[in-house]
Every structure is written in structure tokens, then in C-alpha cells.
Image (cartoon, rainbow, N blue to C red):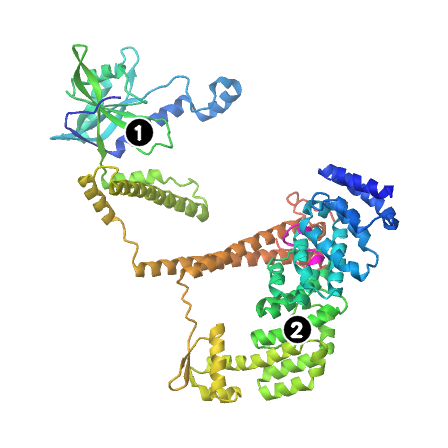
Amino acid sequence: MAPSSSSGLTFKLHPLVMLNISDHFTRVKTQLNPPSSSCSNGNNNPSTGDATTLPQDFRVYGCVIGAQKGRTVEIFNSFELLLDPTTDTLDRSFLEKKQELYQKVFPNFYILGWYSTGSDANESDMNIHKALMDINESPVYVLLNPAINHAQKDLPVTIYESEFHVIDGIPQPIFVNASYTIETVEAERISVDHVAHLKPSDGGSAATQLAAHLTGIHSAIKMLNSRIRVLHQYLGAMQKGDIPCDNSLLRQVASLLRSLPAAQSEKFNEDFLMEYNDKLLMSYLAMITNCTSNMNEVVDKFNTAYERNSRRGGRTPFM
Amino acid sequence: MSSVEAVITSIQGLSSSSSDLSALHDVLKGASESLRTDSDLQLSTLDQLDPSKHSLGYLYLLDVLTCGPVPREKASDVVLLISRFINACDAVQIRLASEKFVSLCKRFKDKVLELRDPLRGVAPLLTAVRKVQVSTKRLTALHPDCLQLCLQAKCYKAGFSVLSDDILEVDQPRDFYLYCYYGGMICIGLKRFQKALELLYNVVTAPMHVVNAIALEAYKKYILVTLIHSGQFSINLPKCASTAAKSNFKSWSTPYIEVGSCYNDGKISELEAVVVANSSDFEKDNNLGLVKQAVASLYKRNILRLTQKYLTLSLQDIANMVQLANAKEAEMHVLQMIKDGQIHALINQKDGMVRFLEDPEQYKTSEMIEIMDSVIQRTIGLSKNLLAMDESLSCDPLYLGKVGRERQRYDFGDDFDTVPQKFSM
């Protein structure tokens, strides 16, 4: 476990970078293991198992760019790079070409570091890191863990810096963990929202879309509820005295709670109940209509099946 | 003697698993004839068996013992024995021989009525109904007996618990008529006129080829309950009643129709005159109490009509218009109606004015949510039943035959495959 950084830099990560990295990873993975061949692979090679595990764990690499203002490092964008397997370093000429192109469009951005996927930082990563040190004297290393872990609540993204520590009498650079925050521009928030709420592509019927929409709202409220519950437990423990009082945290919690909508007033309850009742009445009406139409069908079928006088001739059947 | 002992040992041996039970069933069927004539079979021999484990055998032996005439002293013993058996028996075993069980319970009911103690039989029959029922939606032959005992014993609440299940499948129409008729009477006793109306309506409009005495009695009560509940009377039966009913009911129930048409006019004095004139008929049908309730409800109906015409009215005016004796009685009537929830009004006691209000229900409360929720759930259940019926009808060969016959006229090349006229089963 890498120790935390002491450089005092604050890192701000934009969601675009994370989307880019995950997109890169997914694209390469599907290209290596296309779904059609995986089905036939299942018949021919039972050893391949499920399509998600690959014969070799592969990683994708790329560069991150952004701007540094004072002590704040803001990582805006990223692009992909190829790892040269012979020298085990990133393709340098390609990197410089891309850098020139990006410089024309974004003159303020320059290369801040590189990214890769995996679960933890390796020793070999240090070589790549050192190779980038001539472009940026202190590059950052963004690591994305592509393994899907449903129990994990936080983002699987870690940012590493390099620091020189004395190990066995020799100063060596090692990776140290750096904390970061997520920074969004309005446009980014919209696109992230869009990606998160990918609806069924054929549009479905109104019913499936409504169901998907409501499920999204339900899960969002559930998460909000669980987070508030954590805070509640924390405050309760603090009140009991199990945890030492932290005033700055209390101030943060108070400001957070004030921003939540107040839902306890008398007028709100009345309006809420009235609207709830209206919705219930509407669904009741819909149910009754549905039942009535079912009943109509049943009666029609019953009459055709069991009527005593059969009607022949002159009847136009419905086409 | 040996046959009795042999039967008892076989019962004790073969009462454990379902395959054994079917074997036991065959044994018992074969042995029942010989047991009938065997004089060794006494009530005491039943002590060797345990009713909860050996229910099937116990049932057969009880049946044999009680099919003949039972002397009076023994009647209460027999009743006690049967009620204990019903409480303890195992439902699965009973369902294998349900007709025997049903006839046993009917005999039980007769004995209880003979002993003039119907209350003893109510609880056992309730449990018996639950045990014989394959599913809660099915009507059994025991339902009307149970309801009859409840009526005789005047414990309406017990009967009402049986009525609260919706019945969706019926084996015998006669059971259904009796069930609805007795059920209607129980609801009248509990003053739940809405449900009574539904049940009696079912009997009156049930399909029948000839006039059914049960349906006729139900029709008389139906007229009276419509008067009490909704205050209106129409001389015609509902459209879906059978033709036999439509043509014959009216001739058999003329005094009731007179009461109904008089009610429609709304004059109390005339109505009372008609009632007095026909009171002997009403007494013969045991409906005099119901008729008196109908007369009392005429006041209510008139006051209700007043709410639609006036916004405020003085108590004296109400008394005059409704032909009540004085303002005090009018006030009592109005108070009663407000309490029952039939009208919404405010009585100003200072100057004796009554102000009629609209229904104050705003549908804003959380109790309303619970009511709506339960109603919606019930509708969902009914909808499922309807869909099941729809499916079963679609597979019905009669239906398919008729539909196929119509489709066969149009052959658009190979697009429509012809449905055969008849299905060979």
C-alpha cells in the first residue's frame, strides 16, 4: 500500500478522463475477444471459459493532459498510446505528434502524466514513469481498476505521484498515493448523466421507458438514503461519545443538511398526500378500465361459444 | 366381530402415507357394507382410533354408525363425538372421501337442530367448511348448512366470516342458491344491506328453467332490501334475469310489488295502509320485520330527496314535508342519518335550521391511501381471475369450433390456415 503523497498538490480529475480510459479499455477488450467468436469459442475451446476472463491480463496505456495553476493540477483530457513491447516504453514519436496536435487546439494544456489499467501499480510502471520525466518533471500516474466490484462504493481510480524515498540507503523513486477530487464542467455533467441513463436503444414502449426512468430515480434515492444513514450513525456515535467530536466535520454535515429539501411542513404533507391520492385514483381507474375490457372479451367469447341460436349468413367477419 | 377388528387394525396400519391411504380407502369401501350389518360396531370401538391420524377410517366408521336412526339419549353423545372429530381430523385424508364427510356433516346438522341447540354446531361446521374446501374460491355443499346453523343460532358474525371470501367456482347450483339466500339473510341481520343486495341479486338473476322456490323467496327479500338500501323500486327484474323468472316472479309476489310501487310515491300513510292490509302475507313469509324496516326507511329517503332540493331548511319544515309528527322527531332522524353517513349536514340548534353540505371527503388523508391501496389490490386479483377465464375460454373446443367456422369462409391463398369444423376428441 503506497503511502500518501506529501507534495501538497491538489489534484482535480475530470470525468472525461475516466470515461476515456474505460472506453479505451472496453474497446480493446471487445476487439481482442469479439462476442461472436466467443460463442463459437465456447463450443470449440471449453478452456476459454467465460468471455470476461482473457488468456492474458492486458493493460491499456495512454497520456493525460491538463493544466497546472499554482498548487492545483487539473487533469482535463486524455488520449491513447501504444506500449512498445520491445523497449517496454510508450511510443515516443506518436506521443510527440499527438502533443503537437493537441497544443494547437488547447494551447494551455500540456502533458501531465500517463494512465493505465490494472489493480495496483507495478515495478515496471516506474520505468515508464521515469521515461516521461523529461517532458514533465513530476508526472502523475492515473490507474483505473477495470474489475467490476458491486460492493465497492467509490470510484476505482487512483492517482499516484513519484517521490524519492531512501530505501536501503539508495534514494529511489516510489509511487505514493495522492488524493483527488472530481471536477465537472456543466457540459460534462450532462454527458455523464446521458451515459449513465442509457435507455433501451429501440426506444421500447412508453411502459419500459417509464419503468427504466423510475428505476433510476429509485436507485438514486436509495443511495441518498444510505449515505444519510451513514451520517446519522456517525452523528449518533459522536453524541454518545464513542468518537471524538470533529467540529469541521460537524460544520460540513450541517451545511449539507441545510441544502437537503425540508420535508416536514404541514402544507407539504397535505399536498403530497393529495398528489399521491390522485395518482392512486388514476391507476385505479386504469385498472378498472383494463378489467372492463377483459370482461368484455370474456363475455364475447362466452357468447360465441355457448349461444343457442347460431347466426349464419349475412355476417361480415372482422378482418 | 373379526371383521370389525380387522378393519380397525388395517386403519391403524395404513394411515401414514398417501399410497397407503388409497389402499386403505379401497379396503374401507369394500368393508363398509359388511360393517353396516355388524352389531359389534359401537361408539366405544371408535376410542381405539385417533381422529387426527386415522381420519379416513374414523370417518367411515362414524358414517356407518350414524346412518341409522339414533335414540335421543345417544344423540348428544353422537353430536359431541362428531364435533370433536371435525375439529381434530386431517384435511388431506378427508378430501379423499369428501362426499361421505359432507353427508356426515349434514346429519350432524340435523341432529343439532333436533336437539334445538344450533350454537353447538356453528364452530364445528365452520372448521368443517374450511377443511373440505379445496381452495378458498370454491363453494362446497357445506356452506349453506353452515350458514343455516348460524342463522338459527343468530350468531351472524360467524356466518359473515364465511361470506367474506369471494366464491368463484360452484359445483352444484342448488348449493349456490341456498348459499346466496342464507348469506343475504345473514347480511340483513348484520344490517349490511349492500352485500345482502349483491347476494340476493345473484340468486334472482341466476339462470333457471323453472321457477325455483329459493329464488322466489329471495326475490321478495330482494325487493324489500332495495327499498331499504337505495330507496327505489323498479317493477322490472334486471335484464340478465332468466325468462322463467321474469314471467313468473311477479305473479307470486304481488303484495311486495304493491309495497314497492307505493314506496315510489313517497306517502307514508298510504304505505302503512298497504302494509297493514297485507300483513298476513308478510307474516307467512317471515318478512314482517323487513317490511317495517322498509317503512322506516321511507322517511330517510324523503329526507335525502330534500337535500337535493334545498340548501337550508328548518326542522319544522322537514317534519311537515316528510310527514313526521314534530320537529323533535325530524331532528332525531337527521341526526341518525348524519351518524350513518348517509347525508352531510349541520344542525343549528339555536334556530332549528339544518344546512345541507357537500361530501367533505377531500381524498387527502393517509387513511384514504390505505383504502385505495386495498381496493387496487383487490382489482388486480379480480383481473387475474378474468384473464384465467379468458384463457380457458379461448381453449374451449366449442368456442374454437364456432370461430373456425366463420373464418373458413375466407381463404386468402395460403395466408389463413383453415380451422377444422369439428374437433375430434
Q: Are marks 1 and 2 in contact (CB under 8 Å)?
A: no
Start-end of magenta stretch: B131-143
The three-letter code of the residue at mark 1 reads Pro
Q: Nearer the viewer, residue B413 or B163?
A: B163
- Amino acid type shown at disc 2: Lys
| Chain containing the residue with disc 1 | A
Q: Relative to A114, is B361 above or below?
A: below
Say what secondary structure mark 1 lies in: loop
Pair 1/2: label in front: 2
Residue B410 visible in rendering: no
Q: Is residue A1 above or below residue A268?
A: above
Q: Which residue is mark 1?
A: A156
* Viewer-side residue, A14 vs A159: A159
Q: Position of residue B76 (x, y in %)?
A: 75, 59
Q: Quadrant of residue B281?
A: bottom right
Q: Position of residue A151 (x, y in %)?
A: 37, 32
Q: Secondary structure at mark 2?
A: helix
- Quadrant where the image shows the C terminus of chain B: top right
Mark 2 highlights which residue? B221
- Name the image quarter holding residue A55: top left
